[in-house]
Amino acid sequence: MIAPAVFVLLVWMLIPLLMTLYFSFADYRPLRGTFDAWIGFDNYVRFVTSSAFWPSVVRFLTSSSFMSALITTLWMVAGILSITIIGGVLLALLLDQPMYGQGFVRILVIAPFFVMPTVSALVWKNMFFNVDNGLFSYLFKGLGFQPYDFLSQSPLLSIIVIVAWQWLPFATLILLTAVQSLDSEQLEAAEMDGAPALSRFRFIILPHLSRAITVVILIQTIFLLSIFAEIFVTTNGAFGTRTLTYLVYQRVLESQNVGLGSAGGIIAVILANVIAIFLMRIVGKNLDN
């Protein structure tokens, strides 16, 4: 039963990748009726030397706000990971305690992970971040403050909150499994010795969760490289939130140049794999210790 499932999974993953690789070496523009099955590396050359690629990189590297932009980017990734890991640990400890309707509560906590990114971004944009009718706007008005436009004044923070809300159930599920595998006798012995709850968490629970936290950081970091729907729905790539994924989207849908966009997609896959290999080496060292 395992072999057919693995085969279906590989086919499901490899067919789009192989089609993207094929189109990256072709000139395919459907609206213009253009299709040339082989143009070599022209798409890659055009993508890397396009007016939207290197100038943005040069402006980023040579601008006076380079360190500020770098720190902002690091804060975005660190913010999502911090919220999901801290919140995941707290929720995992809470869900591990006996309570009435424990199974139903766990389903509610994990449910956001199964919501499509586009849907969740639309919900946050219209129900919470809307400057006129959003929940936060009514809250600000009730407290006597002016409504705050999160999406234009704090776009990175808004994306951090949306993405963290989506990935918090994943972290909670992984960490809950780790918490449940903890030997309860250690906690009972520490409690009998008079160790306070904070000390038990610091010296027993947290070291036990270190490997699970490392795995969460690895997986989430890899997937954070492909954030698109949240940016498209909320900021539409404005306010300094355009990523390489969004640039590929612009090349494919706005110019209808499938070949050029596919080349950009292959470049993005290569960069993602380089970062993934680097992170896997760090994770491997952590798991071996």
Image (spheres, rainbow, N blue to C red):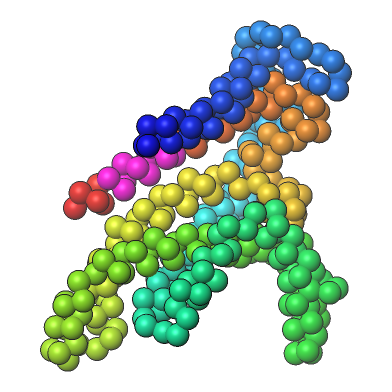
What is the quadrant of the N terminus in the image?
A: top left
In the image, residue 36 sits, relative to residue 61, either above or below, namely above
Residue segment shown in magenta: 275-284
Residue 39 is situated, as x and y percent measured from the top left of the image, at 67, 9
In this rendering, position of residue 38 left or right of residue 197: right
Q: Position of residue 30 (x, y in %)?
A: 81, 21
Q: Residue at x 41, y 84 (%)?
A: 99
What residue sits 44% from the left and 78% below the top?
102
Spot occupied by residue 31 in the image (x, y as percentages of width and height): 86, 22
In the visual, does 257 lie left or right of 20? right
Q: Quadrant of residue 130?
A: bottom right
Who is closer to the viewer here, 12 or 268?
Answer: 12
Residue 62, can we see it? no
Q: What residue appears at the point 81 percent right and 33 percent down from the top-left corner?
A: 254
- Whether residue 144 appears in magenta in the rendering, the answer is no
Q: Is residue 257 visible?
A: yes
The location of residue 155, given as percent across then percent down, is 69, 60
Look at 56% across and 53% down and name the residue there: 73
Above/below status of 75 relative to 179: above
Is residue 172 shown left or right of residue 56? Answer: left
Image-quadrant location for residue 262: top right
